[in-house]
Image: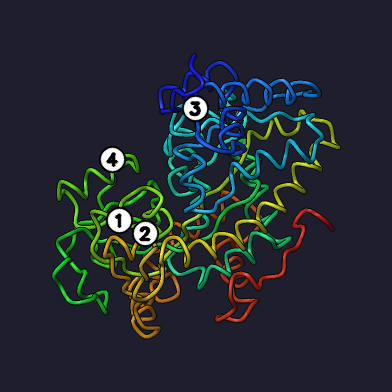
Amino acid sequence: MKDSTPLDRRGFLKIARRYGYTSALLAVAGAAGPLTLATVGKAAAQTEKERDKSAVRTLTFGAAGFNPENLQIQESGQLWFARKLEENTDGALKVDFIGNNSICNQGDCIKKTQQGIIDMFAASTQNSAGSAPYYNALDFAYMFPSRASQHHFFYSKKSEPLFREPMRRLHNIEFLYTHCELRGLMMGKKFEDAPLITSVEELAGTKNRVTGTQLGRLAMEMLNLNPVPIAWEETLDGLKQGLIDGAETWMGAAAYANMSPVLSQVVDLRFFCGTEQTAMNAETFRSLDPELQDIIKETSYEAQQYTQIENERALVEVTGAVENPPAGTIFGDAGVRVASLSDAERKKAEEMCSPEYHPKEWEKWIERISKMNGSHDVYREIYDIAREIPADMDAVDVVPVRWWEA
């Protein structure tokens, strides 16, 4: 192998198969100067040797389509968490981070985790809801008024009885932490020459991709947005080919998935959760020594803070999720306009589709989720927690709390 052979995707995969994806990623991240097969291979071999020295347990982390590059766009922290967990356990836990849809994708990472094929996974709670229906508890329309309110809930000690405990009991999932955004509509080229969208009525009758969450689908039907279930991995092609007019997702996801070249406008509806979680098999978690369990919880707490700060920064500086996205951001360079909508227009959308204004349409799901929980009025209690902080609080100002402590 010549020292000067440039590192390409095939070469990286060859190194990853030999020394592990995480060691290969760490070697690339720590490289100085040009990336070549030889230099990265040597660094990966040394990194793997060091990581193996003190490892007591190796955890396989299926991180859907994530990699070091797109995790700098959507700062949901999965690779950071894997590195930090190894560091905090002094290498006792070794985490094999496998992204790029190489071991699982947005739809099936949770299934493989539940089955014990992999130990940890990263995917959106909405895409995971098909295999773990209690995730729908997060997806009532306009339950969360802001990203700050989402972080506040996941830090809250009440998140244990309302969300975390049912996920263990019902679905064998230990929920660790999550990034927080709110979903809007990413519109394709049909709206390129149209005026900037200012109301939900201008979107009526369009055909839009929806995730696996049944509650998101219900909200879209009430907004006359014609939800079409399409796998995340197929959404970009659907937009390119004009099979759909738009896609419901959040702005960071649209940016990291390279959707911006086929988008014209993004509409900041904020109508339900966009939460890119990291979670693990609950049985695997319980099988670890109590000290390691405590370190995993503490590292998850650190990761929640990481994405609370870093994703807010990346939304502005990298994605350009602001009115008139500037040059140098993904949206700015692609000419994607951000339709922020007024508070009055978002309120109008809320009045069209939320349980607060249409209790009968949501009654079945409110009762179903509460029955799954067994002890709580889940919708009402999460709704109230989300409003314990000021509506205009910035996400970075939410005070972190260790949710598991008494």
Marks 3,2: beta carbons within 8 A: no
Q: Is residue 195 above or below residue 236?
A: below
Q: Which residue is mark 4?
A: 234
Indicate the amino acid at tag 2. Answer: Ile
Indicate the amino acid at tag 1. Answer: Ser
Crowd rating for badge 1 (residues with CA inside 10 Å; few <14, some 14–19, many 20+) = many
The image's mark for residue 330 is 2
- Pointer 4 or 3: first along the chain: 3
Instruction: Please state which of residues 265 and 363 is positioned toward the viewer in this rendering.
Output: 265
Identity of the residue drawn at 38% across and 72% down: 358
- Pointer 1 or 2: first along the chain: 1
Q: Position of residue 267 (x, y in %)?
A: 32, 69
Indicate the amino acid at tag 4. Answer: Glu
Q: Which residue is mark 1?
A: 260
Q: Position of residue 90 (x, y in %)?
A: 82, 34
Marks 1,2: beta carbons within 8 A: yes
Identity of the residue drawn at 59% across and 25% down: 116
- Pointer 1 or 3: first along the chain: 3
- Pointer 2 or 4: first along the chain: 4
Image quadrant containing the C terminus? bottom right
State the SS at label 4. Answer: helix
**Residue 333 lies in quadrant:** bottom left
State the SS at label 1. Answer: helix
Instruction: Please state which of residues 344 and 73 is positioned toward the viewer in this rendering.
Output: 73
Lateral position of residue 100 relative to residue 27, left or right: left
Marks 2,4: beta carbons within 8 A: no
Q: Between marks 1 and 4, how big is the CA–CA gap?
A: 15 Å
Q: Between marks 1 and 2, how big is the CA–CA gap?
A: 7 Å
Closer to viewer: mark 1 or mark 2: 2
Q: Which residue is mark 3?
A: 36
Q: Is residue 120 above or below residue 227?
A: above
